[in-house]
Amino acid sequence: MDVADTNLVGPEAGACDAHDDADLFSYFGDNAPETGDAGTAVSTKVSLTRAGTWRDRYDEWKHSVEDRLAAIDLAPDLASNIGSRRWFRGFGTMVGLAAVALAFWPDMSPLEARPAMKIDAAAHDELRSQMIMPLALGADSGRRMSPTPEVIPLTSAPERPQIELVSTLAEGDSFQSMLRRAGLSSSDVSRVSELVSGAMPLSEIDAGTQMDIILGRREADGAPRPLDELSFRARFDLELAITRESGALALERNIIRVDETPLRIRGTVGDSLYRSMRAAGAPASAVQDYIKAIDEQIDMDREVRSTDEFDMIISYRRAATGERQAGKLLYAGVDRGGTSKTQLMRWGEDGRFYEASGVGEQRGGLVAPVPGPISSRFGMRRHPILGYRRMHSGMDFRARHGTPIVAVTDGRVTSAGRAGGCGNAVKLDHGGNLSTRYCHMSRMSVSRGQNVRRGQVIGYVGSTGLSTGPHLHYEMYRGGRAINPASVKFVTRAQLSGEELKKFRAALGRLKTVEPGLALKDLTPTSEEVEAPLREIEKLDSVKEVE
């Protein structure tokens, strides 16, 4: 049968004419198609293979390469089939790649720098004129003209006739060291210290005090500059000035007039007592003292209402020069409906608050010596070091090394030092045949014979003595016999009586006569404090102000 007479089956049959040169057909081989009676082909099975374009041939080649590379498996998983040929081949690939990476490791030798450019004197002056340096150190900035041969150099540069500077006394620094750093000579430092110490102790000069210093012209090259003037505020009511007169230093005292009228602040409690007091102008430290004093006397959550009025009086000083200084809280009160509900005034050398009846602050409850949980309570237990059961005569508080330890109530230190298995220990006598002891301290902050207050730090947590780790062993004794500290609650109360009570009530009455806000007004200058006017028309105004 001729190829041209073959009937094609399939979708390619209609596409032969369009691809005469590009399509190849496979025809029947040994098995010829059977013909029916009508002479038509019964079996028309023909396989058609189509050769694609160059793009199709490239895709076919690419896929075949990918299949071959995938079969090679250049980077097998070294975590599986350990010890097999495939694993060793992958291991060899890894070692080979590592060797190639090391072969291309960069050289760490320093790079050769470009040699510096050689410049002459003219170029050097030109570059120097463009430098930016601190003007305060005498440097020049910006473009300028270089000196010509006509410029005659000076044998010595002129100095400023005076140098004005401000020196501050730092924390922990001495007055003499501060003067030396300012540039004063040894003789001037000794003389200034002698003059100032004659007016007040040098140790009373507060840290942070600023001193205005003026140094004069040197007497010779290389010699220190002499002191011309020195002035500073030595105290709130004293100003000292040292000047040089006829070659000698002299001290001048300027006593500043100070008014010590206390500052009284009143206002409504409102939603927040702290915010209301701060909004009224009370200092933060005074507000904290007020809340602490009132809270130790009454229950603020239940007995203080938002409609109540707070009344506080603090010590206050006003200087004629305009400075103001707020001090400690003197009076704390709560008023309701125009009547005083609570009145507390500071009284005595210990600075306690007493109510109007003369009863001092009442403080109850056991204060925890450290802010930590209780790890072992009072009673029989197995000792963690000795290994047998014995009486545990105190309470153990778990706390970190260095945690502050406070006194549970007021007392007197009867011993402070090493106490055998208790390590570093402090023992306090609280009166009434009652005492406490604090053991295993890392260090102590009190000494024998010292009086301590409730909440005062007496030492720090450690692990001295028979101890397995940092903690506090706290003991309590009544009549020399150990008792359970958790079974005791302290209540401290002071009571005034007799002549002391009369003085207290008289002082309270005088203090409550202070007008609220009076201390905030400026002091009226006296005739000595009014500066002499420069013009005649100013004299008329100054006379009216003084009157």
Image: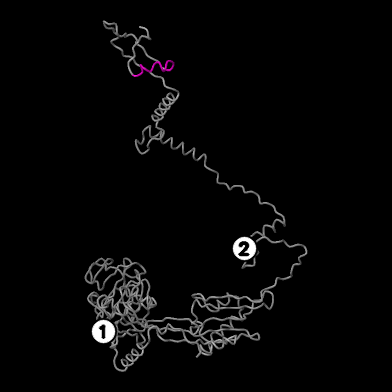
The amino acid sitting under disc 1 is: Gly
Judged from the image, the secondary structure of the residue bearing numbered disc 2 is loop
Give the camera-side residue of 165 and 383: 165
Report which residue position mark 2 lands on.
133
Mark 2 / mark 1, whichever is N-terminal: 2
User: Vertical placement of 22 versus 112: above or below?
Assistant: above
User: Vertical placement of 367 versus 344: above or below?
Assistant: above
Numbered range of the magenta stretch: 11-22
From mark 2 to mark 1, how far is it between C-alphas?
75 Å
Say if mark 2 contacts mark 1, CB within 8 Å.
Answer: no
Give the camera-side residue of 479 and 367: 367
Res 198 visible: no
Q: Position of residue 475 (x, y in %)?
A: 27, 75
Q: Position of residue 458 (x, y in %)?
A: 35, 76
Check residue 432 in the rendering and tell me which mark sits there, or answer none. 1
The amino acid sitting under disc 2 is: Met
Observer-side mark, 2 or 1, equals: 2
In the picture, measured across the screen, residue 214 lies left or right of residue 311, that is right
Res 56 visible: yes
Q: Is residue 72 magenta?
A: no
Give the camera-side residue of 205 and 407: 205
Q: Position of residue 166 (x, y in %)?
A: 56, 75
Q: Is residue 14 magenta?
A: yes
